[in-house]
Amino acid sequence: GVPIAVNNDGKCCALGEYAAGALRGTRFGVVLAIGTGIGGGIVLNGQCWLSPTGLAPELGHTITHADGLTCSCGQCGCYEKYASATALRRMADGEEPIELIGRAKRGDADAKGIFARYVREVCIGIVSLNSIFAPEVVVLGGGISGAGNFLLDACRNALLPLHPTTIPMLRLARFGNTAGIIGAAQAAVLSAV
């Protein structure tokens, strides 16, 4: 007899950032929750968008590499196979992303090269999302957002040669890896009204 709300973590991340975070006041925006996979959500006309089935958007399962690596979803070439924290760990031969990013920040040439390749993959997805939705803001969240401005600056630089015309504003998730918790609470409040 109690109302409940069911949603996934990526969409909750977008809801949290839209309600009180980096997308607050935005009419068109995208949140990328980059962790083990890639989740996220889309704000269109000031509303968090869900497909009629509630299954989409699945941003991590957009195809960025035709005939690429096989994903757990059964498709080949999914964005998350190339731009998730799991992908960064694979690129770094098993080294934890936090350790690799730390080495890159300290100027280690090998780590900087791996991180640059990884950031390019993140940006390939951003360019595709920009071409479809033309968001005012793209928010980078999830565990990888712990890299802070080091990630943000690298993405801004990598976007220029990929999409030199209109680049969306990039922001870090205000609530970092806890945005999904805030969004879940917001979803519960909205379902009770």
Image (tube, rainbow, N blue to C red):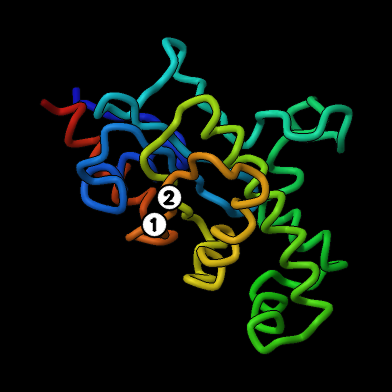
Q: Where is residue 49 in the image (x, y as percent from the top left)?
A: 37, 24
Q: Residue at x 23, y 35 (%)?
A: 188
Q: Which residue is drawn at 21% across and 50% down?
A: 20
Q: Residue 95's quadrant in the figure?
A: bottom right
Position of 108 with respect to 139 (left or right) is right
Q: Which amino acid does label 1 sit on?
A: Ala
Above or below, 119 against 112 in this view is above
Q: Name the residue under label 1.
A: 173
Above or below, 103 against 8 in this view is below
Labels 1 and 2 touching (C-beta < 8 A): yes
- Mark 1 or 2, nearer chain start: 2
Q: What element carries label 1?
A: loop
Q: Residue furthest bottom?
A: 106
Above or below, 132 against 53 in this view is below
Q: Position of residue 7 (x, y in %)?
A: 40, 32
Q: Residue 42's quadrant in the figure?
A: top left
Q: Is mark 2 on a helix, strand or loop?
A: strand
Dot 1, how many residues are within 10 Å of its Cα: few (below 14), some (14-19), or many (20+)? many
Q: Mark 2 points at which residue?
A: 139
Position of 75 with respect to 183 (left or right) is right
Position of 191 with respect to 11 (left or right) is left
Q: Residue 78's quadrant in the figure?
A: top right
Q: Residue at x 48, y 71 (%)?
A: 149
Dot 2, how many residues are within 10 Å of its Cα: few (below 14), some (14-19), or many (20+)? many
For residue 160, which numbered disc appears in the image?
none
User: Where's the C terminus, which quadrant?
Assistant: top left
Above or below, 37 against 29 in this view is below
Q: Find the distance from the CA under tag 1 to the CA under tag 2.
A: 6 Å
Q: Which amino acid does label 2 sit on?
A: Val
Q: Residue furthest front?
A: 165
Q: Position of residue 68 (x, y in %)?
A: 87, 34
Q: Residue at x 87, y 67 (%)?
A: 93
